[in-house]
Amino acid sequence: MAHELRGAGFKARGTSWYKHAPDSLLVVNLQKSLYGPQYYINLAAWVKQLGEAEAPKEHQCHIRVRATSLPTSNAEALGHALNLEDESMDTKQRESFIARFMREDAIPFLQSLGTWEGIRAAVNGGKLKKGLIYKEVQALLQTPASP
């Protein structure tokens, strides 16, 4: 996963990766479950128009979604890959699947949130239906003169 993120221009800081885009700061966060050997990949965008931030935590971002909630056919399989108790994949298959998911699904989706046009398209297209969007972002999207 690190290789794909680095290749897409993200920089690591702790368990999160950051990339500046024109209208937002994009964030990928790896989270370990408190209840078992499961992991989560959290995708987020900090909207620059709502304030400056150097390295916000994923839970502080204005737009947030779990990678397993993306509208892609691979999202359910990602949940299995991130569950280390799931023996349907060996370590090599797991790493390969997660890397491919990041490269083909998660990173392109997150990069689309780098501009207002992309944010608007994701919201209007229902791609963030299972995510969280701050009301301030929703208000900006409703404004006729929004960015």
Image (tube, rainbow, N blue to C red):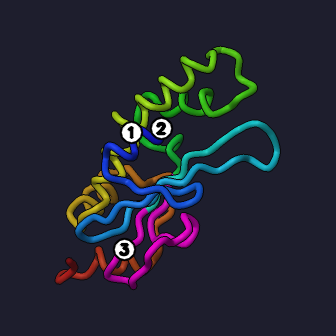
107 left or right of 94?
left
Q: Are marks 1 and 2 in contact (CB under 8 Å)?
A: yes
On screen, residue 23 above or below 40? below
Q: Which residues are magenta?
A: 45-65
Q: Which mark is residue 44?
A: none
Alpha-carbon neighbours of circle 1 within 10 Å: few (<14), some, or many (≥20)? some
Q: Which residue is mark 3?
A: 47
Q: Secondary structure at mark 2?
A: loop
Q: Which residue is mark 1?
A: 4
On screen, residue 76 above or below 138? above
Tell me which residue sits at (62%, 33%) in the image.
Answer: 82
Circle 2: residue type: Met
67 left or right of 20?
right
Q: Is residue 121 magenta?
A: no
Q: CA distance from mark 1 to mark 3?
A: 23 Å
Compare residues 64 and 2 and report the one nearer the observer: 2
Q: CA distance from mark 1 to mark 2?
A: 5 Å
Compare residues 47 and 139 and report the one nearer the observer: 47
